[in-house]
Amino acid sequence: MQGPAVFMDISLEDQALELRKYFKSLGAEISEEKSPKGIEDDLHKIVGVCDVCFKENNEADIEAILNSIVSIMVSIPLERGENLILAFSQRLTKSPGPKLGVVALQSLWRLYNNLEANSPLRYHVYYHVIELAARVSSVGEVFKGVDQLKREFASCPPSNEQMQKLYRLLHQVLKDQNSELASKVMIELLGTYTDENASYAREDAIKCIVTALADPNTFLLDPLLSLKPVRFLEGELIYDLLTIFVSEKLSSYQTFYNNHKEFVQSQGLNHEQNIKKMRILSFMQMAESNSEITFDEIISELQIEEKNVEAFIIEVLKTRLVRARMDQAARSVRVSSTMHRTFGHAQWQQLRDVLLAWRANVQNAHESMKSVAAAQIEYTVQQQKP
């Protein structure tokens, strides 16, 4: 995505006059004369008809016109800056067709990048940039992740309500293209709520859970339970379903589905995909407490036909959630390590024990090396005696 604005080599007043004449020639309702109120009023009038340029057939000419407007916007102090920039952004988001949408997006992105880093107007432009980028399938070019987004607004953080609005938009445009990133955005959104207003985030919390469950690459779901808005859902079916994916086995999900089939379908969740995910999660749970898992155990616990066991194991290993080796001759899987589905007190204790054992081993190795070094020194001294 191109960044810097293109500046014309004439004065701003003459530039505005040329733009007035240009839009008038296209049939826009605008005077060719300069405004007696000054350049800001000129710009106000020009922005009011700027979408007329979309009648042109030449995309390069349209881009030049839009960039000319941008160059004026970022060159003068705007007393009515917010209204002007909002009007300009809104008109560009309505550009017809994908090709003109890309042209409009590039100009809007230039405007965003040429505003001062501490300008509160950057938020409004960025919001419309995302709207327009979604229309032309270019969200990935302007939004790289939550951390990058926070850096964008570090000098002038938007209000909590503004960020919530932006996170909702990002989730909406990402959920069908990048479900993993959409989940991260929604988790960030839920993190903006406090104990006082968490109860108002019900819809956002449900969307967060559904997005995470539907994402084929999201398996660590335990952190969702710590989010305040999610905790407010305790006692509802969606919360019960989440807890099954967090810590229970395939059989629990199947019981839930048999009892609440319509609910699962109403959330837009695919039952077959849920089964697939729960099989992997259940296998992870088996691997937590078993260094060796037989094919027969997999067939029984995960309800997989024997002919599909090896393919399933390969699929699990591809996720890198479990490190293991399949032994076809012994009809078993030897587990080296696995990611825990939940990470509570027991897991922290286990990690502590591992680290203590590692430290003890390092200390023993260090003492052994000291002994070897001392013996070597003593041997060398003995050799040097006459």
Image (cartoon, grey):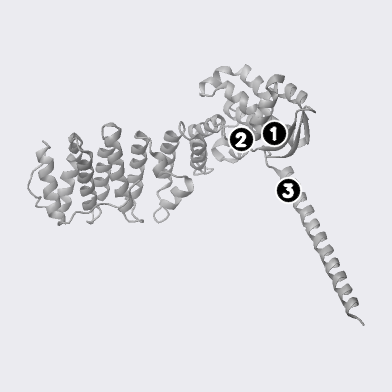
Looking at the rendered structure, the secondary structure element under dot 1 is helix
| Residue 368: quadrant of the picture | bottom right
Front-most of residues 36 and 318: 318
Crowding near the residue tagged with mark 1, few <14, some 14–19, many ≥20 C-alpha atoms within 10 Å: many
- Position of 117 compared to 326: left or right? left
Question: What label does residue 351 carry, if any?
Answer: 3
Give the number of the disc on residue 227: none
Image coordinates for residue 143, horizontal then vertical, percent = 42, 43
* Circles 3 and 2: CB atoms closer than 8 Å: no
Closer to us: 386 or 146: 386
Residue 122 to residue 255: above or below: below
Pick the quarter of the image with the C terminus.
Answer: bottom right
Query: What label sits on residue 284 in the rendered view?
Result: 1
Residue type highlighted by circle 1: Met
Q: Is residue 290 visible?
A: no
Could you tell me how far apart the alpha carbons at marks 3 and 1 are, in whole angstroms? 18 Å
Residue type for callout 3: Leu
| Residue 245 versus residue 113 in the image, above or below | above
Which quadrant of the figure has residue 130? top left
Viewer-nearest of discs 3 and 1: 1
Residue positioned 59% across, 25% down in the render = 274
Residue in the picture at 70% in, 24% down: 309
- Say which label, 3 or 1, has the lower sequence index: 1
Return the residue found at the far front: 386
Q: In what quadrant of the picture does the N terminus appear?
A: top left
The x, y position of residue 112, in whole percent, is: 32, 49
Rendered image quadrant of residue 23: top left
347 sits left or right of 204 in the view: right
Gap in angstroms between the C-alphas marked 3 and 2: 20 Å
The amino acid at mark 2 is Phe
Mark identifier at residue 219: 2
- Pointers 1 and 2 in contact (CB under 8 A)? yes
